[in-house]
Image: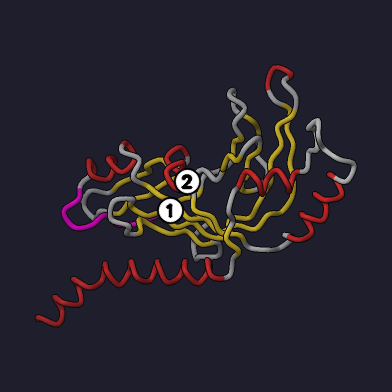
Amino acid sequence: MRRLLLAVLLLPTLALADVDSRFAQLRDQAEALGSLGTFLDKYVGECSGFFSGLGCRGASEEFRKQYEGKKLYMIVGESAASMVQPGPYQPGSGNYTILVTPSFPGGSYFLTQGAPSALSAEDQPLVAPIRVTGTTPEGWNATDFMRLFSSRKVRMQLVFSPEGIWGMERNQGRGKLYGVSCRVEGVLLSNATTGKPLGMWVVGDAGRK
């Protein structure tokens, strides 16, 4: 009986360790990204600034070739608060879903999973959300779960592979908005207070899209 009880108590800890180790393997295959804004600026290569030289577009083409098919890793941090929303929560089991909008602003551009289907009225790229699932710790309830979002306690780590450039006309004739489409390889969400993972999504996982 004691062994059975010990096994039950260890299950959440082992599950969290598995999440950490699986994402760590993916992260170790990727190159750490310092500044998303700098990366997007070099990748898009709009070259519209006054001081843009004649070799600007050529340099951007070389930069894109350099990162073709390469995995990149970044920490989204507190700014993830605008990209995560609470999904369904099951009080009985504590199982929950967190919706992640894979649209990350960096300087004048955006990194999005695939090309956006349209722009919102505020000229924000519209892309389908990623569903990250998890289970709340013992003793938690729906209020504790919702507090993660109201108090901006969700942190995000992301691994992605850039795929190309997209451009869409802004509303009311305000020119074009450019961004970089990518393939999101994995997302790890964690609690900013405890550092413990809240859930992970990795491309290719059974039953996940």
Residue 9, picture quadrant: bottom left
Amino acid at circle 2: Val
Q: Is residue 209 visible?
A: no
Q: Position of residue 13 (x, y in %)?
A: 27, 69
The residue singled out by tag 2 in the image is 100
State the residue at coordinates (68%, 21%). 171
Is residue 138 one of those drawn in magenta? yes
Residue 174 place in picture, x, y as percent: 72, 20
- Check disc 1 and report the residue beneath it: 132
Q: Quadrant of the C terminus?
A: bottom right
Q: Secondary structure at mark 1?
A: strand
Q: In terms of secondary structure, where does tag 2 sit? A: strand
Q: Residue furthest left?
A: 1
Choose the circle earlier in sequence order: 2 or 1.
2
**Residue placed most toward the observer, 115 or 53:** 53
From mark 2 to mark 1, how far is it between C-alphas? 7 Å
The residue positioned 29% from the left and 51% from the top of the image is 193
